[in-house]
Amino acid sequence: MAADPRRLATALDRPLHRAVMLALAAVLTILSLIGVRMITADARIDLLVDPSSPAFLDQARVGRLFGADPVVVLVEPAGNGQLLSPDHMLGLARLEGELAREPGVRRVYGPGTLINTLATEVTRIALDTCGTEGKQAEDKARQQAIAAGKSQADQDTAGQTAFEQAVRVCAQRIAAQYPSLGVPALNNPVFYDQVLLEPDGRHVRPFWTWAMPDPQHAVITARLDPNASLEQVHRIIGRARSAAAESGMRDLRFVPSGGPALTASLADAVLSSLVWLIPLALIAIVVVALAAARALAVLPLAALACLWTAGLAGLLHRPITPATVAVIPVVIGLSTDYFIQLVNRTGEEGPPGRRAGTAAARILPSTGLAALATGAGVLAFAVSPIPLVRQFGLFMALGVAMAYLANLLVGVPIVYWLDRRVRLLAPAPVRGARAAGLLSRAGRLSPAIALGLIAVASLGWAALPGLRVETDPVRLMPAGDPALASAAEVQRKVGLTGEMDLVLTGPDVTQPDAVLWLTRQTVALSSGSGGDLRPVQSLPEFLAGFNDNTLPDAKATALILQRIPAYFSGAVVSPDHHTALSILGLTHLTSVERDRVLVDQVSAVAPPPSGDRSFPAGLAVVAVSALTQVQQDQVPLTALTLLVVALVLGAAYRRPVPVLLVLLPTVAAGGAGTALLLLERAQSNPMTVLLGGVVIAFATEFGVLWLGRYRLELAAGSTPDAAARIAGARISPAILASALALIAGFAVLGLSPVPAVQEFGTWSAIDLALAAVAVLVLLPALARSWLTGLKRAPRVAASQPQQVGEPLPHS
């Protein structure tokens, strides 16, 4: 920050240096064009969870063993037809098999594979039984033929005849034992009706309701790999929807739902909104730039800053998330902000022709300090354990750097070209002097009144811990979201919207005491949930279903687990018998606050048998953990941002007074904005919890610019009153224009269909407006009192002032 502006101006005046700058910009552009093709979207709920937290590790363990949160597909007749038909069963089995082979799918459960597995197993058992009896009859006949002294040919004939007769008798006996079962085949209505339905034919047997809640509705459950990508989720959903066009299933409806479907839909909304948010942001900044500075050349700068930010993020494998989508429009506003400052300074440097280098040399260090403070401030979010917050901080810091680089590498050459050839830069290009004059006069407050206002406004920060975080999924998803409508339809028709699992781990969770404990706790949780939880599947239910509806003893349990296909047992118990599940269905789309109550109930169940451990699992558990972490991070992250910005300013100014002067108005504005949130009863969300830190980081620039010009005038010999008046006249219009550019970037986010992004953009714009007013009203009053004299600058520096915002020596 102490570089000689004349040397920097001389360097910038050299065409070769500017050519090198443009060449570097070209390299960045090429890299960004490559990287932008590598951008991915991510809206997984895991983004809100600390990957090192016990809750996350527990979810990961369950996901590895049983599959993560599932895509659930509701199947029903499109009209008045019947669901249970041979064509439908064949088609469902085919669909389920194809879904099971899709990348990202761990396991698939549904009526087609259920019936097919049972048919195969019944056939296998019958073949094994009859084959064994036939072999025994064959051996006996051979022995009798040998004893009778018959030839080898006669022995073979006797053995074959005995085998065929024994198998025939066995098959007839089995058919007589189960006269209503029919041939065990997927397309045999007699077989699947007998297996699935109660004797009355109108109700599904209780232990199959997870696949068929009723005879007219089926549920296909595709449990995903914990690391399944959004692209894989889209493929699964698309495959399920396309089934309605296939032969034998054209009269069926397929409604995909579940947590992954909701997050995929949210990611789609995030990405699709960029298609029109970016053009809107560009239009907004063009309007601001033309109105404030007639600087239409900002358009390519803003576009480059966006491209570089997105491209480098792609190269660094940083995904677009509901939080990072906010970065691009803000980068547009920020690059406009920096360019307006460059144009404004150029307009002050005298007649056109050779002033661009001097102006750039004097303003770039100032905007550089502001960019450094802003970037460092948002980078403080990177310490958050929550991936969503961490990625936002990294992405935004990258965006700040690219906005500044675009102005340095391309903005400076553009200003040179305009100034020397087109000469469109007027001597005083930034307008808004009347508004700035009004604020300048308001800045003549007494220091006592200014401090009083700061103190009162800062009290608003006390409301920060009390802000309620919105957790209702209906209010967090875009209005009219189709995935939300699908979830509501599934809830209406089968009574479920998701699941929460009671997990039991131990040396052997199939022991009778563990199974009995799981039974009792499942009943207790269901009855004590107020109807929000309903048993769906569990190890006890599985064992009882294959033991005449009673819990088996240890020997019978071992026999069931040995003989029953892993397709059934694998849904509720791990192969090593160390982990078992009781899957409880969520009957309503509840808020995370309500889910927290349910999770607490599952966590507070009676102690399991000695040596075992129980815990809750599922998407709701992840969401509750995320909510707790977000609420805990609000105050620390805001305080850390303030500390980091203060350290950057302290390193630049090397005195505490300028640091306080820059930060106090911004802190007051942030407090006032927080109080407004409380008064408006606006509910926070996982993005607006970052609001305080974002405003501190971005609004610091306004104080840096104003104070830099004020100190410059003091160093040139002006009195504090005169210095404040000149700073107000020279820099305040540019600060207002910069504020408008930033506000426009954030305000465009208020048009996003994603409520979290929408509220973040709207309230950021409001808080930045408050910050701009606070700086122009409160900072002059404090500066006149606290910073009254600096060492006079050399005469040459007075005639050619130092760069705005450059720290001057301590006096």
Image (cartoon, rainbow, N blue to C red):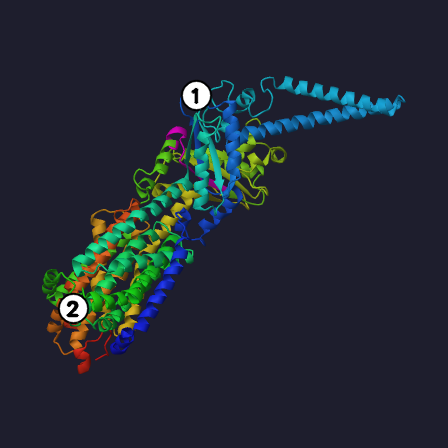
* Residue wearing tag 2: 782
Is residue 185 left or right of 629 when viewed as pictured?
right
Q: Quadrant of the N terminus?
A: bottom left
Residue situated in front as seen by the camera: 321 or 365 = 365
Judging depth in this view, the residue of 533 and 404 nearest the camera is: 404
Q: Secondary structure at mark 2?
A: helix
Hey, what amino acid is under mark 2? Leu
Tell me where the magenta segment starts and ends, as one range: 490-503
Q: Label 2: few (<14), some or many (≥20) within 10 Å? A: many
**Is residue 182 visible in the rendered structure shown here?**
yes
Confirm whether the magenta stretch covers residue 494. Answer: yes
Task: Find the distance from the CA under tag 1 to the CA under tag 2.
Answer: 79 Å
157, 454: nearer the viewer: 157
Residue at (23% x, 77% y) in the render: 808
Q: Is residue 706 magenta?
A: no
Tell me if mark 1 has few (under 14), some (14-19) or many (20+) residues whose alpha carbon lies within 10 angstroms of its own. Answer: few
What is the x, y in percent for residue 549?
54, 27
Which structural element holds mark 1?
loop
Identify the residue at horizontal 27%, vertical 67% (top origin).
Answer: 412
Q: Is residue 551 above or below residue 473?
A: above
Picture coordinates of residue 572, whole percent (x, y): 53, 38
Give the x, y percent position of residue 451: 16, 65
In the image, which disc is placed on residue 81? 1
Q: Is residue 608 visible?
A: no
Name the residue at 26% across, 69% down. 364
Q: Count the labels in the image.
A: 2
Disc 1 vs disc 2: which is toward the camera?
1
